[in-house]
Image (spheres, helix red, strand yellow):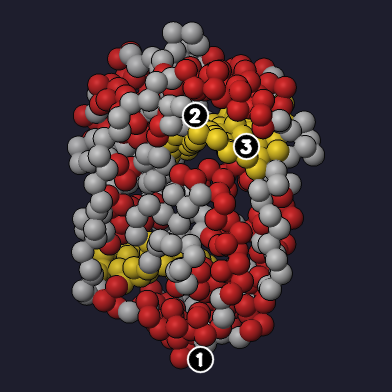
Amino acid sequence: MRLRIALGLLSLLSLLLTPPLAVAAPVTDNTFETTLANGMRVVVREDHRAPTAVQMVWYRVGSIDEHDGVTGVAHVTEHMMFKGTPRVGPGEFNRRVASVGGRDNAFTSTDYTAYFQQVPASQLKAVMVLEADRMRHLTLEPIGYSKEIQVIMEERRMRTDDQSSARVHEAMNAVAWQAHPYRRPVIGWMSDLEQMTVADVRDWYRRWYVPNNATLVVVGDVNHQQVFGWAKQTYGAIPARALPARKQYEEPVQTGQRQLEVKAPADLPLLVMGWKAPRLNDPRKDMDPYALEMLAQILDGHDAARLPTALVREQQVAVSIDTSYDSTNRGPSMFMVQASPRPGHTVEQLEQSIRGALAEVANKGVTDQELARARSQLRASEVYKKDSVMGQAMEIGMLETLGYGWQSSPLMLEKLNQVTAADVQRVAQSYFKDDQLTIARLVPQPLDAAALAARAKRAEAVQAGGRH
């Protein structure tokens, strides 16, 4: 399962969002943490509303840690984690989880790799034993690898090569980032996948899959002291190893607009505009990332938001438009707007309309009513996220793995509630500059019947290869 999980603060933290000026409810009452002797972090949140539990193991390693020549190895390793150990044969992990009515999967992103199981609470220890086993004893054999790498290459063909929008975003990242590893695709370049060996995967696994590079998150109908004891028995028995030194990659300051064009089979053109924007470094001191998150919500957080109202319904220059900004990363961020022009309109006309909408925010600002609407949307999503043990585990794991700590959630929510209309206008004036802009345009090409048939065949091959 290849993900660039781009949950910004507004979606990541809405779990505990409170109305403006209200006091955030404490999250420490039912959340407990410890660190095992081998350095593995353990965070447990007790939620006794249903007899279920989620276990997640987050490794602080993703495509950001790769180097040229072995791109995609983080994702390949994720696939191989389901190929068994001396104690648990290939596919047996999935079958055991399913046999108790549970579900499991994994995902790889630029910044981390994570594995999860949601099972009846009575089966939690059993899946902890399974997960600890493959942290230490993964079977990496040439035969199993040679089959799986073919599945992954088919996945790349289906999810990137066959998807015009994915090709645009891949090419855009390669142009927008010059020095930073975010320029490389999470799934890897095809030439690297073709040349990758099981030895490359084994080296990656041995370097990064160690307890002192992992966080265990458990949420559900559990007793935290009992979970701590089980964690000590299972994960605690795995020795720590020294981690490789992580280099800090500094992206050179962009000093001029960058543009690229991608030709691919598609029905409609596509325009993607991305401005360099700050990541959240210090949750307590920073303000611009929070203001940018609120701006993204005001522009495209609901059907009546500014961009769909102005460009899709009123001007009718676009058939669709999306805005995204993720401030919680290990690396730098971009504020992105993606849209397709309505037939009869050009990409150039659409670009000017987007620029006009952003200039209006910079020149005239936003209203207090728009800010209130954005907060109301987030409070509505709180109800749903509180009902999800998986959503809670995701929030804890991401905050921990990205270095913010799960305890920072109330502070981040408070800072979001402090964002004013003047803050939003200020960031619109500061960051939407052409010198920090990269523009990608998709030029549609015809798609023949043979190509459509090949796509369908590839999709079947990927589905047969498994869920992750």
Could you tell me which residue is drawn at 47 percent across and 52 percent down? 404
Can I make out residue 216 in this image? Answer: yes
Q: Residues within 10 Å of mark 3 (few under 14, many from 20)?
A: many
Of marks 3 and 2, the one in the foreground: 2
Labelled disc at residue 44: 3
Q: Amino acid at mark 2?
A: Leu
Q: Is residue 217 above or below residue 312?
A: above
- Residue 156 in percent (x, y) is at 36, 39
Can I make out residue 3 in this image? Answer: no
- In terms of sequence position, does the residue under pointer 1 or pointer 2 come before the other? 2
- Direction from residue 44 to residue 105 in the image, left or right: left
- Direction from residue 264 to residue 325 in the image, left or right: right
Is mark 1 in CB contact (under 8 Å) with mark 2?
A: no
Q: Is residue 317 above or below residue 389?
A: below
Of marks 1 and 2, the one in the foreground: 2
Q: State the residue position of label 1.
A: 364
- Direction from residue 394 to residue 279 in the image, left or right: left
Could you tell me which residue is drawn at 40 percent across and 61 percent down? 281
Residue in front for this viewpoint, 433 or 238: 238
Could you tell me which residue is drawn at 30 percent across and 68 percent down? 438
Labelled disc at residue 36: 2
Residue in front for this viewpoint, 97 or 341: 97
Of marks 3 and 1, the one in the foreground: 3
Could you tell me which residue is drawn at 37 percent across and 25 percent down? 240
Mark 3 lies on a secondary structure that is strand
Residue, far top: 86
